[in-house]
Amino acid sequence: MDLWLLAVALIALASAPVTSRSPNSVPANLYNNTACNLALQASGLSPPMGAELAEMLQWFRTHSLLMVGDSTTRQVYNWLHKEHHVPDSCVAGPGVCDPTLAHDNLHPTRWCLNPRMKRTRAMLSGEWIDVKGAGRSDWDVVLWNLGSLHLLGLHPVRITRDYYSERPATSTGAINLTNRTAVNYTFDDFYHRALDCAEKLNEAYPASLRVARLTNRICSDRFRGMYETVATERLAATEDPTGYLMQMNEVGAAALNVAEREAARVHGHLIKDSDTYGMCECTKLGDGRHFFPTIPGFLWRLFLLLNASVPSARQLGEPLRRLLRARPPPARSFREGEWSP
């Protein structure tokens, strides 16, 4: 792994905004809506309204979008499908599909072992069940994230597990995360996993526009209890460079973003930032990694990126679609969504 990647990760961390807790903080598990709205406005992430909202939703209702990711991606799916009635497209037609929604055992890391897997074991029953979306390969867009937050640890309060292999069911038929082997992932491990996932998505969905969704930032000052204590201690544990980059706080999130950008660049994917930088007022106390109020603004920026890349492919037919997919990988540039000759 090039040392410059490590340097970029540390630079990203050093430039991250520091947010202190207000003495008038709201109760646990609530947002400070006023502070969050101010942060959204300052970052240009205010939700689309009126005609802009209608235009954005119409685009998602008329294109097919596969969304591979963890709970942070699932929130985006829920906003579109459950709150704004964008159709579910796992079987056919336009709309959005989250293949992991009904199957907690189908972690995104396992999806990337075989993106077209037909069946997986259910988390609770241990029985084999059909995988949503596995029968389709004609998605207009594949938006993916490796579920990267699950690979970050904070020993001893957060132990990372082996998500990459099928674990046998227990005597009661249950499959759960606690009977998976504990694993200390390194930055290099994650980088090569991201490369492998991007390559497999290229093979499984060659006609789709593939977009890497960067992992959410982490706001460890929103943690509480032992999570907060250990996260603060780990920030200063620079004597352990291997584990240092894969800790569940701002350091780990910055490192993951570097690896994700490079994996996307190598395999010619577009890049969509999570739009959670500086948004610590928009994540709940006790959480620090889900940013639900930022989703409308994120989707508006995603819509602008996708609308510039695939809007006329359906009207002009398969030749244009092939032309779009055949664009060369971008040069070493981390500007969001940029294609470089």
Image: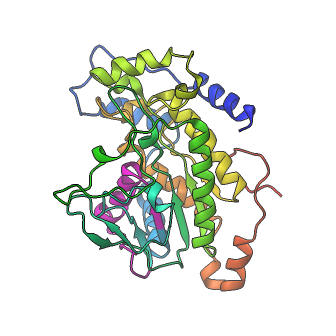
In what quadrant of the picture does the C terminus appear?
bottom right
Q: Is residue 243 magenta?
A: no
Residue name at image x 43 percent, y 55 percent:
165
Q: Quadrant of residue 7?
A: top right
Q: Nearer the viewer, residue 244 or 67?
A: 244
Is any atom of residue 337 visible in this view? Answer: no
In what quadrant of the picture does the N terminus appear?
top right
Q: Quadrant of residue 110?
A: bottom left
Q: Position of residue 50 (x, y in %)?
A: 41, 59
Residue furthest out toward the right: 341
Q: Position of residue 255 (x, y in %)?
A: 58, 34
Tell me which segment is drawn in magenta: 66-93
Is any atom of residue 11 visible in this view? Answer: yes
Q: Position of residue 76 (x, y in %)?
A: 39, 55
Q: Position of residue 24 (x, y in %)?
A: 27, 17
Q: Is residue 71 magenta?
A: yes
Q: Quadrant of residue 37?
A: top left
Seen in the picture, residue 48 relative to 56 is either above or below; the reply is: above
Query: Is 223 situated left or right of 50 in this image?
Result: left
Q: Nearer the viewer, residue 254 or 127?
A: 127
Seen in the picture, residue 334 relative to 165 is either above or below; the reply is: above
